[in-house]
Amino acid sequence: MMMKITWSRMMFGTMLMSSLVLAACGDDEASNEESTNDSDAPTEESAGEGTEESTNESAETEPKVTEFEPAFPEQTRAPAVETETELDTEVVVEGLGVSWGMEEFETNRILVTQRDAAELLIVNLEDGSVSDPIEGTPEVNNEDQGGLLDVTVAPDFEESRMVFLTFSQDIEGGTVTSVGKGMLSEDETSLEDFEVIFQATPAYEGTLHYGGRIIFDDEDNLFLTTGERSDVESRDRAQELDAYLGKVIHITQDGEPVESNPFVEDEDALDGIYSYGHRNIQGIDYNPATGDLWIVEFGPQAGDELNIIEPGNNYGWPVVSYGLEYSGEFVNDGVSEHEEQGFVEPRYYWDPTSAPSGMSFYDNDAIPEWENNMFIGGLAPNYIVRVVVEDDMIVGEERLLTDEVERFRDILVTEDGALIASTDGGSIYQITAAE
């Protein structure tokens, strides 16, 4: 049964800054597992109606790292903004597990992955009903951050009924981030002929930083994000072109490298690599206003980044960072200037952390002032981040659902313009314009 709350205010300005200070306290512990993990815990503007107001106050609390200076003024600590539209929020579903990925495959019907149980469910957003687990999902390693991760459907799903999943898989030598596909049966009870099409080798004996987000490009190929597997002994592989760790990967629907990838002529590089130097990418989407591909990735303590992805670019991890090690020490002696080291500066970074997870641009006019804004799930502190983007610059931020005390894992915008958010606590939220 759906619970409904009418919100005449969904955001906060300076009046709620003190509550954010409290929420930010201890966010390092809340955003890591066993002190090494930043994304899971054991408990794991634009045109339109109305004119939103911006203050001179940042949406963030006081920075954790005062030694770093941004490369340009708009790179961090954007001013707080507030949505003018009156909004309704519904808890569509409760009682699920960690709901890691979502995809709308029919109007108001979404596929939802259950990370730990390795289950794929169908949720009806209109009546809150939840299907039995779909049979045929792959075996996973569900320790720590592992399990059944993201889900998307083929661009020709109505004809092919093909569903793509990412998951952490045990292979010889450790675990990998894998991509597989199977056909959803006509009765929607099983994935038929499921097969693994890609493995982000090399395997590593660890259970953290799998990345795992997938999205189709406009030529019906897949982008896959991976993490560098967290540990000091693995993180340097993000800089190495003979490993798929810490990368954006570009593959066909059969798991083969896309022929136009930037390193296909380099004998020492893996052909599937599109960009590199990433830490743990947890969100990916296209900006509908520009067509640019954006990702959001975890920093360590602070230094979470928004990046525009271009083929062949190196984004710097672990050589440079705007964050700190969990020990409190600087990363690589405190080198933060990306361009001076030959790396791409992030378009934006957070300090303190927002622990960003799944993201989606609002490509809809149902709430006009949100059009082309970015929405990101926040794991610690617990809220949804609204990011206002103009000319590739971040000009405003807003915090949604700060009172729900949920770890928001993934974000989806439906064809009807509803903002859907899944949580580690097993709830599915729906935000719409009030009628």
Image (cartoon, rainbow, N blue to C red):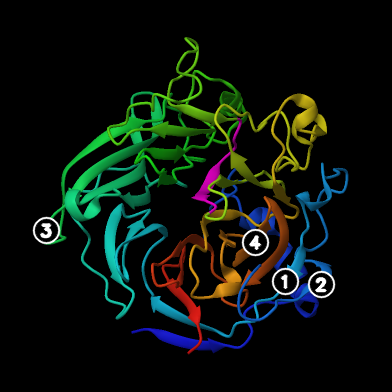
**Callout 1 amino acid:** Val
Instruction: Say left or right for 220 vs 284.
Output: left
Give the mark nearest the N terminus, 1 or 4: 1
- Residue at left 49%, top 59%? 409
The residue where tag 2 is placed is 55
- Is 334 left, or right, of 413 in this rendering? right
**Residue at image coords 80%, 27%:** 340
Is residue 8 in the magenta section? no
Image quarter where the N terminus lies is bottom left
Inspect the image, locate mark 3, and give the three-letter code of the amino acid beneath it. Answer: Glu
Please name the residue that numbered disc 1 is placed on: 81
Asked whether disc 1 touches disc 2, contact meaning CB atoms under 8 Å apart, the reply is yes
Residue under label 3: 186
Magenta segment, which residues?
Answer: 277-287
User: Which of the two labelled residues, at mark 2 and mark 4, occupies the earlier sequence position?
Assistant: 2
Q: CA distance from mark 4 to mark 3?
A: 39 Å
Secondary structure under tag 2 reads strand
